[in-house]
Image (cartoon, rainbow, N blue to C red):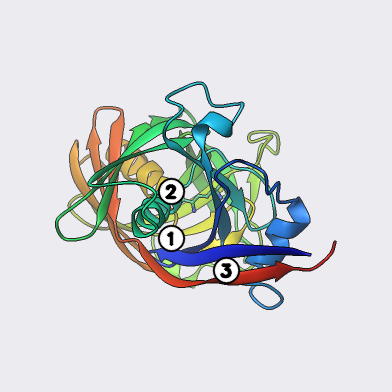
Amino acid sequence: MRRWRFSKGHGTQNDFVVLLDRDNTLQPTVEDVRWLCDRRAGIGGDGLLRAVLARHVPEWDGDPSVWFMDYRNADGSVAQMCGNGVRVFVRYLLDEGLATGPEVPVATRAGLRPATVLPDGRIRVGMGQVAVGAGSVRVTTADGAAFDATPADVGNPHAVALTTGIEALDLTHAPRWEPADAFPEGVNLEFVEPRGERHVAMRVFERGVGETRSCGTGTVAVAAAARERLGGGDGVWTVDVPGGRVEVELSGDEATLTGPAVLVAHGEVTLPGH
Ligand SMILES: N[C@@H](CCC[C@H](N)C(=O)O)C(=O)O
C-alpha cells in the first residue's frame, strides 16, 4: 500500500497537488498522476508538483542544494515549466520549513527560476527568456472560430491569438492548429483581448490539461506577443485570467511574473493499486 502526504494549492486558481519526495524515491507513474489530479476519483488538480532535492535529480546539472520542481500535467505528461506552479511550490517549501525566504531559487526543467516573496505576500518569479516566434499558425476552436496565433516560447511552447470576445469561445474541446506539424510536442493556446494600456485578458487551453483558470507561462507569452503586436513596450503588463490577475514585467527578452500563491489543504492519500 502506498500512502503519501500531500498538499493542495493554487495560483490564480490554476491548482496543483504537491508531493514531498526529498530523495526522489516515490516514482509516480502516469496513472498515479492522473488519479491524483482526478477531481472525482482522486484529489483534483491541473497538475502535480513534486519537490525533490536537486542533488537527487540526474538531469539537473546546476546547484545541487536547491529544490527541483518536477511538474506533470493532469494527463500525466511532463512539462518543462509551470509559472503558477513555481509560486505554489515556493509557498509550500516555506510553509513546510524546507526553504527560507524571501529569496527561493527553484530548479526546473527549463532552468533555475529565482523567486522572491514580496511584502504583500505575492511571489515574483524570474521567468527567464521569452521568445516570440516569426510567422503564425491557424488555430480553430471547437465552435469553428479561426484565428492567426503567434508562437512564443517560455521554456514551454505557446501560441497566442489576439482577438475580441474571448468569453464566448468554446474551449470545452481541444482547438486544432495548422500546419498540424507546427508543434510536434503539443502547445498551450492562449486567446487574448486588449483591455487597456499594457493590460490584456486571456483564456487558455493548456497542453495536457484542457481549459484552466490561469497559466503563468501563458501570461508571459501573452504579454510578450501583445507587446510585439499591439505595442506598449517594456514595463509591467497586467494580465486578467478567469482565476484572477497577475503582473508580467517585460524587459527586452527577459520576463518576471508576479502573483498570488495559496495552500488550501494538507493530508494523506492512499493510492489505489494500479
Ligand atoms: N499552468 C502552467 C503551465 C503547465 C504546463 C503546460 N500545460 C505545458 O504542458 O506546457 C503555468 O502556470 O505556466
Mark 2 residue CB less than 8 A from any atom of ligand 1: yes
Nearest the eye: 164 or 72: 72
Mark 3 or 1 closer to N-term? Answer: 3
Label 2: which residue? 218
User: What residue is at 31 percent from the left and 35 percent from the top?
Assistant: 228
Q: Report the label total.
A: 3
Q: Residue at x 42, y 45 (%)?
A: 217
Q: Which residue is mark 3?
A: 170
Q: Residues within 10 Å of mark 3 (few under 14, many from 20)?
A: some
Q: Point out residue 143 in the picture as x, y percentages from the top left corner.
A: 62, 66
When the figure is inspected, residue 60 is found, relative to residue 263, above or below; the finding is above
Q: Does mark 1's beta carbon lie closer than 8 Å to ligand 1?
A: yes
Horizontally, residue 133 falls left or right of residue 208, namely: left
* Dot 2 and dot 1 residues touching (CB under 8 Å): yes
Helix, strand or loop at label 1? It is loop
Kind of residue sitting beneath label 2: Gly
Residue position marked by numbered label 1 in the rendering: 214
Queried on whether the Cβ of the residue with tag 3 lies below 8 angstroms from ligand 1, the answer reads no
